[in-house]
Amino acid sequence: MASEIPFQRIRLNLRKYILEPAKRRREVKLSDMKEFFSDLEAAERMLSSGKDPVIYQYCEYEASEEPDNLILGLTVIYPGKVGKEYFMTRGHFHEKDSGEIYYCIYGSGIILIQSKDGQTAYMELKQGDLCYVPPGWGHRTINTGRKRFVFLFVYPSGSGHDYGIIKEKGFAKLVIEEKGKWKVVDNPRYLG
Ligand code: PAN
Ligand code: ZN
């Protein structure tokens, strides 16, 4: 039947920053990821003063769960900081070492990548920029602007996400604000 063909128009709703249709949606608040920020005391202070902001949200469209399909998604990272560190995604490695494409559609930020042996690289992404994340590299995105940082991403289904390594060791680099500007610095607590 025609309706079973995974072939449909997907709309980018730029008013709500969602894909329509989207099969998975997730909102990540500070309380869901406080251990990922380097200044845990600053995170705890925000939470105990009653602030639990949404750090980012994302939705995904997956036509089929069969391997070799592609997953299309949209992430919105809100502007803000925890201590000096900007709001960011948790970051992960793909379990299957697959690559990924990012396309910034609004705002600006940084994509930070890291190999399993601790090599790092980063790139600034502004509206209209694309980035290819090579297979095997962990990746995290950071909103360094005052607006929302919004990007599309595409990766193979069945890639899997490993958050454990990042949660345990952290990223070797942090993106912080200093004198009103973003700066990439070594993470003093990195357990590489
Ligand atoms: C992105 C991320 C999304 C949320 O879709 O999953 O931006 O970030 P975390 O998964 O690190 O919380 C991606 O890289 N998917 O593979
Ligand atoms: Zn990924």
Image (cartoon, rainbow, N blue to C red):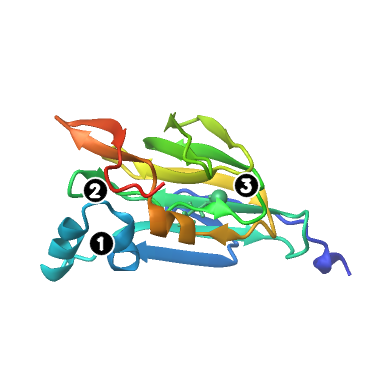
Query: Which residue appears at 55% of the width and 33% of the height?
Result: 131
- Image position of 67 (left or right of 169): right
Residue nearer the viewer, 173 or 65? 173
Q: Is residue 16 visible?
A: no
Residue holding disc 3: 154
Residue nearer the viewer, 177 or 106? 177
Amino acid under disc 1: Pro
Please tell me in which quadrant of the rendered image residue 124 appears.
Answer: top left
SS label for mark 1: loop
SS label for mark 3: strand
Q: Is residue 125 visible?
A: yes
Mark 1 and mark 2 lie on one chain; the one further toward the N terminus is: 1
Query: Which residue appears at 54% of the width and 51% of the height?
Result: 93
Mark 2 nearby-residue class (10 Å; few <14, some 14–19, many ≥20): many
Whether tag 1 and tag 2 are in contact, CB under 8 A, the answer is: yes
Residue 170 in the image, given as x and y percentages of width and height: 38, 51
Instruction: Decide: is 76 above or below 63.
Output: above
- Image position of 30 (left or right of 121): left
Residue 123 in the image, given as x and y percentages of width and height: 44, 29
Report the disc number at residue 80. 2
Amino acid under disc 2: Gly
Amino acid under disc 3: Val
SS label for mark 2: loop
Query: Which residue appears at 50% of the width and 30% of the height?
Result: 128
Please state, as top left, top right, bottom left or bottom right, where the N terminus lies in the image.
Answer: bottom right
Mark 3 and mark 1 lie on one chain; the one further toward the N terminus is: 1
Residue 85 in the image, given as x and y percentages of width and height: 25, 45
Report the disc number at residue 12. none
Q: CA distance from mark 3 to mark 1?
A: 27 Å
- Image position of 59 (left or right of 168): right
Report the disc number at residue 53. 1
